[in-house]
Image (cartoon, helix red, strand yellow):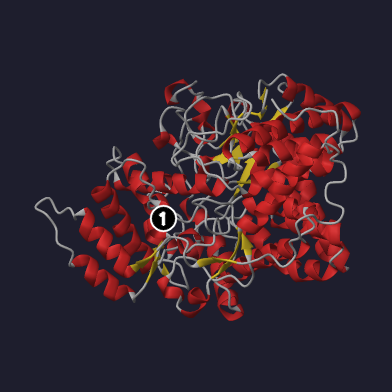
Amino acid sequence: MPGLSEMPTCLLPRPHTRPCLLLFPLARIAILRSSSTMASFQALSFRNFCSISFTIFFGVLTTMSVTESLKDCSSNTAGLVIPTTPLVHFLERVQETALSTFGESQFDPKPYVDMSLKFDLSTAEAAFDKLPKSENLSISVEDLKGFMEKYLEGAGDDMVYVEPVDFVPEPEGFLPKVENAEVRAWALEVHALWKNLSRKVSDEVLKRPELHTLLPLPKPVVIPGSRFREVYYWDSYWIIRGLLASKMYATAKAIVTNLIHLIEEYGHVLNGARAYCTNRSQPPLLSAMIHEIYRQTGDVQLVKKSLPSLVKEHHFWSSEIHKVTIQDAQSYNHTLNRYYAMWNQPRPESSTTDKQSASKITNISEKQKFYREVASTAESGWDFSTRWMRNHSDLTTLATTSVLPVDLNAFILRMELDIAFLAKVTGDESTAEHFLKASQARMKAFKSILWNSEMGQWLDYWLNDSTCQEPQNWEACNQNQNVYASNFIPLWIESFYSDTALVKKVMKSFQSSGLLFPSGIATSLANSGQQWDFPNGWAPLQHMIVEGLARCGSKEARSVAEDIAVRWLRTNYVAYKKTGTMHEKYDVEKCGEFGGGGEYAPQTGFGWSNGVVLAFLEEFGWPQDRKIHC
């Protein structure tokens, strides 16, 4: 695997020349919401904006001097930072103390920032500061446990169980293509897991939100499971696909209502519904959720309610920090998008881990740059993977903000197509035409910037810098030619899977890529120890590639799709029978083995795995005579 020194010259960082581009449009689009302020702000010319030193101070944004952003564009500190809350800061202190007191063995930092307070923050802080300390400033196990019992509620205690209103043990018309009794019995057990994962935000959060990092939501939720006790954005798509197979339409619509609520409150769907996640999103799939619910229910009112929020979300992903212009070989400009978290400190839920990862970085601005890359990788959903690392053996070379990802741009293309379709449903022809044109422009960008004809794949594109200089000139060597499952995600989009010749070429490339293993599609070919690399397989990646192949109209492609689905279903089934639970990820080399690696222990539950199992069984069924064991 290439290290930094082995990478082509065109992939190495270059000097930046246009520092103001990061701040202006996002401030205009995502922050300033009143019409009067917007009007006066838009009247400010770009030249004046860049020459005047001033401070943006609005709502949840930190004070940030533009003159600071002019100092060093290449440092990546020149972006917006959405601050977290005083409670989160305090719980990070508790987290760090707990690591020191309890030790590193099986330590998980997340539960500490998921706790809530029994008393107001000032009372808890005062008591914490008075805890007796030894000569080396450590706190005893007994004293820390005593403090936590007296002043803190347990992680997840503010997310309470609720019975789903539309759950029945065996829904009418449930998985009619599943003929095998053993598989059907298992499918009903997976279906029953929706009850285990159903929650609602406690009334206490609504009464005293300042005591909680959990954010208020208007409707019940379905959580992924285990340490993931709150709503997560992109997990919700595959949870909804499973709920629709389970005929739980009301629960699916409630999830969408919660995500729309987050857009209205924060301007985007958050990575997760926690106070420490307001500074980043996740792969944008809300439009796909709404489209799928509409396809199965015909709920026009949901579409009408959702459309303005979907347009807002598209604005968020089109803001200056997320968009990049690349000029192709014919001097035509294309706009594509990247992940870019509005944060440059350790992630609170992994603060002790991030600090340890950054411990060898001595320069403050470089450390902040690394923290932004870490948070941006969390925004990608692929945290972590060699896909984002300039040196595959060194996590500190994460450079996610310098990548134009294939899958993110496929998701935004789908968003544009979905909005165009849903706008037509409501009779809004103007919006439909606008987003159809946007999708057509993005299709051209895919062909010019991301498509690699020789490989028959779409490839992530590495930027020369953090886009302070635009447009950048397209260079072939900036395409990342390493093989990742994400290289094939565009197949999920109708604009691509409807092209018969293209599907044939991409399918041939996929079959020779080395990604297909006995138990599914590997995330990558790099065995790095990161969880979004080999040998792990993830339910969302299996589903998108399989669904694209299945829908393209080719019998050969559908056969390949069904073969992958069968492999995935078998490994899920065998692991379930061995362990009694569904898992977050699986080892594609070994049937019935769950995955590992990464910064936390393997998780169970598990929302998106359950959803993909039910979606595959709905699509392909299971014949009576097909064996389910490995």
Q: Position of residue 106 (x, y in %)?
A: 36, 42
Quarter containing the C terminus: top right
* Secondary structure state at the residue bearing disc 1: helix
Q: Is residue 574 visible?
A: yes
Residue occupying the far left of the picture? 135
94 left or right, relative to 23: left
Q: Position of residue 598 (x, y in %)?
A: 46, 37
* Residue 234 seen anywhere in this rendered image of the structure: no
- Kind of residue indicated by mark 1: Pro
Who's the residue at 29% across and 49% down the image?
99
Residue at 46 percent of width and 44 percent of height: 373
Left or right of residue 511: residue 19:
left
Left or right of 160? Residue 408 is right
Q: Mark 1 highlights which residue?
A: 111
Instruction: Provide residue 268's location: percent of width, then percent of height.
Output: 60, 62
Vertical comparison of 411 with 308: above or below: above
Residue at point 38%, 50% (across, down)? 109
Residue 554 versus residue 143 in the image, above or below: above
